[in-house]
Image: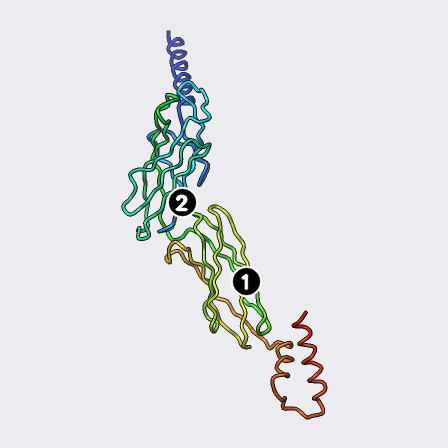
Amino acid sequence: MGRMVICLFVALAAIAASGSAGASYVHITSPFNLTAYGNRTVYLGNVGPGQTFYVTISSQTTNSTGFLFNYGWNHLVVTDLPDGWIAQNSSLNNQELSSKISVSPVAPDGNYSFDLTAVNLGNYSKLGSLRFRASVNVTPNVFRLNVTPTTLHASSGEPAVIYVTINNTGVSDSPFIIGMAGLPAWNSTSTVIALHDTVGRFQYPIYEDEPGVYHVTLFINSSASSRISKESNLTFVVGASLGNDYAALGQGSPLFPIVYAPAYAVMYVIDLIARAL
């Protein structure tokens, strides 16, 4: 009798497991690969205030018997958003369905959640809909920064290249702005994109006409919010340029004996030729 009870328990457990395995699900493909089931909560990751991110799902799913539908889900709907957030539901009947979600730019740091519903339009495949909860953590710390070299050398008027590495640990693909403070009259910025969960390496050239030692600050801001920002302090050593010195000879009279005038003229011509090439 005891053996029969054990066998019956095992059989019921197997049936329950089979039913769970054959239940409908949602396969999330972005921002990360996850599988969601009805009335569950999935954590998507970090996102910055004001940033926009996408939740993308596959249209494939199975019914309660395990039958596979390639276009089981036809629409992804976002509901129950926090105050100040904006969403755009997915398009219809694609192999991948993407909903766009924008975080409020004034959202305080912390955990937030909202509902996502995968819909079988018209219940054509008898799947109905599957609703699950998604959560994200709002924080300005959505990337790591590495800048090399920390000391740069260049001749006046010639560019020095800074290598900027952005490790985007958040779920947003919002652009980043690279800029520099501390150089006279320098206000050039560069906009780059480091996709979520990737590392991007970018070149940022700077130059200065006047020789000297400049203590400068490289800053990285997200285009979505000034709160998402990091900076690095660098030293830029600008020396006199031989070419610029040659060019200056043609702009006036050098304070040296007249016997050197032919040499000055030759050097000036060399500079003109070099600039023309």
Residue 174, position as x, y percentages in the image: 43, 50
For the point 52% across and 60% down, the residue is 147
Q: Is residue 202 above or below residue 150?
A: above
In the picture shown, does residue 40 fall above or below 203? Answer: above
Provide the secondary structure element on which disc 2 rests: strand
The residue under label 2 is which amino acid type? Answer: Phe
Circle 1 residues within 10 Å: few <14, some 14–19, many ≥20? some
Residue 114: % across, % down: 32, 39
Residue 171, picture quadrant:
top left
The residue at the point 39 percent across, 47 percent down is: 52
- Residue at image position (55%, 72%) is 237
Q: Quadrant of the C terminus?
A: bottom right
Location of mark 1 (residue): 162
Name the outermost residue toward the front. Answer: 276
Q: Earlier in the sequence, mark 1 or mark 2?
A: 2
Q: Which mark is residue 53?
A: 2
Instruction: Count residues near mark 2 (Cα–Cα under 10 Å), then give few for <14, some for 14-19, many for 20+.
Output: many
State which quarter of the image contains the N terminus.
Answer: top left
**Residue 254, image x and y in percent?**
63, 88
151 or 182, nearer to the observer: 182
> Nearest the camera: 124 or 177?
124
Res 129 → quadrant: top left
Task: Name the amino acid, label 1.
Answer: Ile
**In the image, is residue 158 above or below residue 163?**
below
